[in-house]
Image: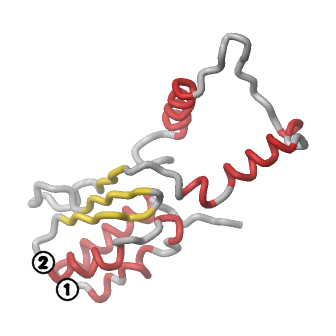
Amino acid sequence: MNVGLSNDEFISGVQQQFDELYRPGDNEGIQTVGDECVHIDAIREGVEEMKSMPFMFLQTPQFTVKSPQLVDSTKLPLLELDLRHGVISDVKLGLPQATTVELIRRELLDQPIHEVVDWAKLLQPQEWDDDHRNLGTQLIAWLQQAFPAFDSS
């Protein structure tokens, strides 16, 4: 599942956008091809490119991901990540404790999202102050669900 969308909704949106950008001309038609066409060099090269790490993760536009509000007393989402080309470019946290916020920001900023294998290892909640350790565990659980580790094999 893509963040906040079902696979069908995501696929439909990508297809619609692709159609708007690359609509075939009057003499062309849209064709669906399968594995039987992978022997054609241009198709095989296209398939290989679309399966590559740079294509899947580093060609994304800028977007923002917000965690669900985990703390009732905050008016802002607990975590807001801006990503550009698959890399976290900005981090906003709805926590009052500056030390914890800075620790989390430092670990997340400039992090390529597809390289994270274990959010708990990256963020190390055991180093957080006592007041925020439980929130850290909830936050990490959300990150693991929203951005599961990518298996490149």
Q: Nearer the viewer, residue 21 or 69?
A: 21
| Foreground: disc 2 or disc 1 | 2
Of the pair 80 and 8, the residue shown nearer to us: 80
- 132 vs 141, left or right, is left
| Residue in the image at 33% along x and 57% along y | 82
Instruction: Name above or below for residue 138 compared with residue 28.
Output: below
Q: Which quadrant of the figure has residue 11?
A: top right
Give, as a three-letter code, the residue at label 2.
Gln
User: Considering the numbered disc 2 on the image, is that residue within a helix, a strand or a loop?
Assistant: loop
Mark 1 surroundings within 10 Å by alpha-carbon count, few (fewer than 14), some (14 through 19), many (20 or more): few
Position in image of residue 79 (x %, y %): 26, 62
Q: Nearer the viewer, residue 101 or 45?
A: 45
Location of residue 99 (image quadrant): bottom left
Quadrant for the C terminus in the image:
bottom right
- 58 left or right of 45? left
Residue that appears at 27% across and 54% down:
68
Few, some or many residues within 10 Å of mark 2 (<14, 14–19, 20+): few
User: Residue placed at 57% from the left, 25% from the top?
Assistant: 19
Q: Earlier in the sequence, mark 2 or mark 1?
A: 2
The tag on residue 129 is 1
The amino acid at mark 1 is Asp
Q: Are the residues tagged 2 and 1 within 8 Å (C-beta)?
A: yes
Q: Dot 2 corresponds to which residue?
A: 97
Q: CA distance from mark 2 to mark 1?
A: 9 Å
